[in-house]
Amino acid sequence: MPTVIVADSLTESRENIKTILRADPTIEVIGEARDGDEALQLVKSLSPDVLILDANIAGIDAIEVTERVSPNVGVIIISLHDDKILLRQLMRAGASDFLLKPVARDELIDAVRVAAMRVQRYRALAAGGSEGRVGQIIAVYSPKGGSGKTVIACNLAVALARHHTGPVCLVDLNLQYGNVDMVLNLMPQHTIASLAQRQGELELEVLERHLTTHEDSGLQVLVAPSTPQYAETVTVYLVEQVLSLLRKGFDYIIVDLPTVLEDYSMVALDTAEYIILVTELDVLAIHNTRVALEILRQLYSPERIKVVLNRANSQVQITPEKVEEVLGCTLLARIPSDGRLVVSSVNNGIPFVLSHPNAEISRSIVQLAYAIMGREAPIGELVQPTKQKRRIPVIGPLIDYLLGPS
């Protein structure tokens, strides 16, 4: 049961927050504070899981309070104003979430659960008390559509599944328009939306029954909802639960993120061992990538953020070296362009790392997988090609699938 302290200089605001939280029997309010000094004293004496802190708290300001208690306590900031500069400062100080007043009930409870789960996991890791497997989350993101992010994520996940001896999972967090299942030619019985009614009591065994197996690689896949309206059932808390459980059951979890970062995307970024930022050789992509890098570097350690250049051999005026100069970093990988092979791969639902393992583009993806594993890629033939006759092309049954049940 998450324990909470509410810190706000306004009595009415404190009472409103407490009323919302006390209506939920799974959350316990153990104290309240009228200023920053009192909040720090209560945190020290009561050791709560979560501190709900007003952005304009009297006394010691919210930024200093957050810096002094995070990450041992999850800090949720509430504010009357959508101040982007203050938000950035508070997130850099370690705040878990930022909510605007008046706070909606479901939004607040969801934020408390997520913050409590994060801090409990942090405490367990800090105490050396984690048991069993703790898998690595690899978040794949691009701030520009059409960059090839999903194709890279799918082929990277398949490459890891084939070249790593342990279990690997791919999660499609593009909840409204995810198409990982299309790229891999999967016909899933369940999606992440199927888990919505199980949040709060979700276990790894239940989660595993909602995964779809990619037969040619053994990769396990949690696909996105079949239609956009089902995306609304997937909460931040559910995503936090799913990723936390997957880390216990899988060595690597590849997460394909949407272009527009949502609250649930931040859960994946918060817990990711690596954030793979995909860009390409055009001015708009490089501009968006530079902006995204600036934001991510303020929130996370720069060592966790890796840039991958897709279509790196395109005959344009911009060179990969110029990209590195503009972004101020070394590229983790350069994925060459092979439009004919990629289009054929997607249309037939066979990842090119399987159908054409010795193509230059496939080798670059496998080398990326080995870089993530911290191992040297093998020399020579990487894997035996997957025979295409084993698969039913996507294009044929695609319309039937789209018109089928959700």
Image (cartoon, rainbow, N blue to C red):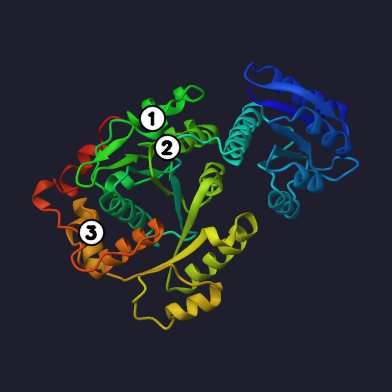
Q: How many marks?
A: 3
Q: Amino acid at mark 2?
A: Leu
Q: CA distance from mark 1 to mark 2?
A: 8 Å
**Is there CB contact under 8 Å for labels 1 and 2?**
yes
Q: Are marks 3 and 2 in contact (CB under 8 Å)?
A: no
Q: Residues within 10 Å of mark 1 (few under 14, many from 20)?
A: some
Nearer mark to the viewer, of 1 and 3: 1
Near-viewer residue (63 or 405):
63
Residue marked by disc 1: 207
In depth, the one of 48 and 350 nearer the eye is: 48
Residue 168 location, quadrant: top left
Task: Choose top left, top right, bottom left or bottom right for residue 380.
Answer: bottom left
Going by the picture, which residue comes out furthest to the front?
Answer: 128
Pick whichever, 167 or 227, lies toward us. Answer: 167
Question: What is the C-alpha distance between the residues marked 1 and 3?
Answer: 28 Å
Residue 222, x across and y down, in percent: 36, 38
Tag 2 secondary structure: helix
Indicate left or right for 389 with 257 as reference: left
Q: Nearer the viewer, residue 176 or 8?
A: 8
- Mark 3 belongs to which amino acid? Phe
Q: Residue 387: x, y in percent?
A: 11, 53
- Residue at image position (88%, 38%) is 37
In percent of width and height, residue 183 lies at: 28, 50
Q: Which residue is mark 3?
A: 352
Taking the image as shown, residue 23 lies to the left or right of residue 145, namely: right
First of labels 3, 2 by sequence position: 2
- Give the residue type that dot 1 points to: Leu
Residue 122: % across, % down: 60, 39
